[in-house]
Image (cartoon, rainbow, N blue to C red):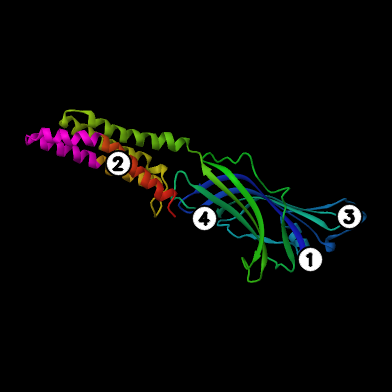
Amino acid sequence: EPIPVKVGVKLQQITGVDQKSENYGAVYSLRMKWQDPRLAFRPDECQCEYKVFYNDDFAKYASQQDIEWPTFVIENQQNNRWVQNKAVEVNPDGSATYFERFTTDLQAPDFEFRTFPFDEQQFYVHVDSLFPVDTFTFEPDNDFTEIGSQLGEEEWYITDSQSTVTSGSFSTEAATPRFELRFWAKRHLTFYIFRILVPLGLIIAVSWITFFLQDFGKRVDVTSANLLLFFAYNFTIANDLPRLGYMTYLDALLVGTFIISVLTLGYNVYLKRQESKGRETRARQIDRYMIWLYPLGFLLAFGVVTWMFFVKV
């Protein structure tokens, strides 16, 4: 009969999120509990109530006694796993508890940033047994598994989490058990609202306010300055945007704002040329409609872009 192993993982800290490389750094605590009669001992023989093995001492002991124990790999681990603490406690009845606290970088290929900065991302850790399911089976240890309350990550907040156990040919050719802790996180939006979206809205508002100027020459000057301001603003926030191979929602808003700013400048230049050719009356008639078509057109474009990124599949 396979030995059941209760597996629990606790997320202690998120040390960083690399959006371009699609990985994240984290500090985890791992606990496994199982019982094997071959590990049983008599307390009077060692004059102890339990045995404690540190670091790799238990692996050496199990190897000498020819006892299998639930060795594992972190399937989505990308770099070295730096172990801060590792210990195994064995009781006289053969029950054992393995504990490890480690830091590593973990792959997160489910990252999808199309709706950035309103995106929700998935993070996970996979603990795969090296022994097949006929030797060990995994069970979730819900008493230990949890998301820490102080993760040290200011940009993200956890919205949900779940732990599951599956089996399949993951890290070896044979069918092995897998424990998965998966959690979802969203961004704190205060920074993006006041640092990016509010200034973007003000740039659009300034472009519209110029329509109320009667002097077409002044309009050209103001819209030209506004376009230069947008260029400077775009360079300023460049480091705050993820560098990806596809367009995000915020990218679409920035491109749309740029197009609107250029079209507004071109429109005002056209009105100025009409005035210079003695067609001021016609220019005023066109302008009377554009004052209200401009905000309606912007709202329509904004709605279409939002629909494409959040509603359209």
Residue 163 x, y percent position in the rendering: 65, 53
Q: Amino acid at mark 1?
A: Ile
Residue 141 x, y percent position in the rendering: 72, 52
Classify residue 241 by image quadrant: top left
How many angstroms separate mark 3 from mark 2 (CA)?
83 Å
Q: Quadrant of the N terminus?
A: bottom right
Name the residue rendered at 56%, 48% in the picture.
184
Which is in the foreground here, disc 3 or disc 4?
4
Residue under numbered circle 4: 110
Residue under numbered circle 3: 46
Which is in the foreground here, disc 1 or disc 4?
4
Question: Which stretch is magenta?
Answer: 262-291
How many angstroms separate mark 2 from mark 4 (CA)?
35 Å
Q: Earlier in the sequence, mark 1 or mark 4?
A: 1
Up-down: is 133 above or below 294? below
Classify residue 96 by image quadrant: bottom right
How many angstroms separate mark 1 from mark 3 (CA)?
19 Å
Up-down: is 176 above or below 235? below
On residue 297, which mark appears? 2
Q: Earlier in the sequence, mark 1 or mark 2?
A: 1
Q: Amino acid at mark 3?
A: Cys
Nearest the viewer among 264 and 90 is 264
SS at circle 4: loop
Up-down: is 83 above or below 173? above
Q: Earlier in the sequence, mark 2 or mark 4?
A: 4
How many angstroms separate mark 1 from mark 2 (CA)?
73 Å
The answer to whether the residues at label 2 and label 4 have Cβ atoms under 8 Å apart is no
Q: Amino acid at mark 2?
A: Gly
On residue 67, which mark appears? 1
Residue 292 x, y percent position in the rendering: 27, 35
SS at circle 2: helix
